[in-house]
Amino acid sequence: MGKLFGLLGYKISHSMSPIMHNDAFKVEQLPHHYQLFDVDPEKLKDAVCGIKALNIAGFNITIPHKVAIMEYLDEIDETAQMIGAVNTVVNDNGKLIGYNTDSDGYLTSLLEVTGDRLKNMDVLVIGAGGASRAIVYSLAKYGVKSLVIANRTIEKAETIAQDCKHFMQIKTSTMKESEANLVNFDLIINTTSIGMSPNIDESPIEINELKENAVVSDIIYNPLKTKLLQDAEAKGATILNGVGMFVGQGALAFEKWTGIKPDRKRMEQIVLQQLGG
Ligand code: NAP
């Protein structure tokens, strides 16, 4: 029998998740369907009750519900608890279990570019919001050579560093300090929303000099090549956009719901088609 899945968010009409997941269901010959659920923050609790009552099999959660949803779930896995946000829920016979697939989704896409080199990299993460938490957690757990978080609001960077201190010691810095020291990093990751459409002429940092063989990653996927990535490419860096993270988190969610590893390359093509890339 076909099962219903979906995305819980607010003002999410442009989401690419339905097209990506519905295509994957078709490819795997599963009679399931994925749809958007636009939920006002005030109605989140009611929405979760509705999900249980209607026996919706699983769902993703996006802005602004990733943290707020946690109090309405029956169980939260250790990674999601550490990150403090849930983006995927499995309905296990009426028990709603929360996971965070953003962190491993990003790591998978990053490893495709860096390979084992990642373990020896000095890493700068710009931003200290929800996505940064997931990414810093995955990098600290994986183990990189060193990790610095730079953020406009430095206290938020310090909180993430503190929360991950059992994995490794993480330093924090201001945006200006990190900008002046870019040449010391093998990997620079932008997790802020600076540079996202329509503000495509903005960049979180100005790139003057980069280390040889540096990798610069931006988790924004609209545009596919942000100003930061354009500037980094012009300085000879290898670049990685946010499509891999988006596909990575979706593929891991799909696997949790169905037990099947979907064709990630095909998912990526579907997303790129939507983005006109
Ligand atoms: P968030 O929790 O709101 O965090 C936003 C971050 O951006 C904070 O560090 C914030 O700094 C910083 N920031 C925003 N505007 C700024 C400005 N004008 N100057 C300096 N810093 C600024 O958001 P999020 O959920 O982490 O998402 C961040 C970005 O990642 C968004 O563009 C989102 O679309 C993207 N994202 C992509 C994926 C993917 O699958 N590729 C997944 C998740 C998110 P303060 O702390 O100082 O406010």
Image (spheres, rainbow, N blue to C red):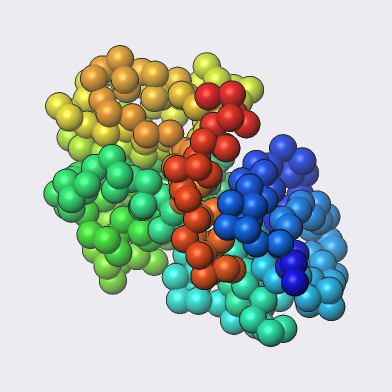
Q: Residue at x 65, y 62 (%)?
A: 30
Query: Which of these two is toward me, 184 or 140?
Result: 140
Q: Is residue 80 visible?
A: yes
Q: Position of residue 248 (x, y in %)?
A: 46, 51
Q: Which residue corresponds to the image point at 46% horizontal and 48% vertical from the top-left?
A: 264
- The residue lying at 39 percent from left, 19 percent from top is 230
Q: Work out which quarter of the rendered image holds the N terminus and state it.
A: bottom right
- Residue 266: image location, x then y, percent: 50, 42
Q: Which residue is more in the foreground, 6 or 144?
A: 6
How many numbered callouts? Answer: 0
Quadrant in which residue 210 is drawn? top left
Percent position of residue 67, x then y: 62, 63
User: Can I make out residue 65 in this image?
Assistant: no
Residue drawn 44% across the image and 29% down it: 204
- Left or right: residue 62 compared with residue 200: right
Which residue extends farthest front?
29
Return the residue nearer the eye: 184 or 227.
227
Q: Position of residue 257 (x, y in %)?
A: 59, 68
From the viewer's perspective, is residue 190 above or below residue 7? above
Task: Describe residue 261's horizontal placement relative to residue 110 as left or right.
Answer: right
The correct choice, above or below, for 236 with respect to 126 in the image is above
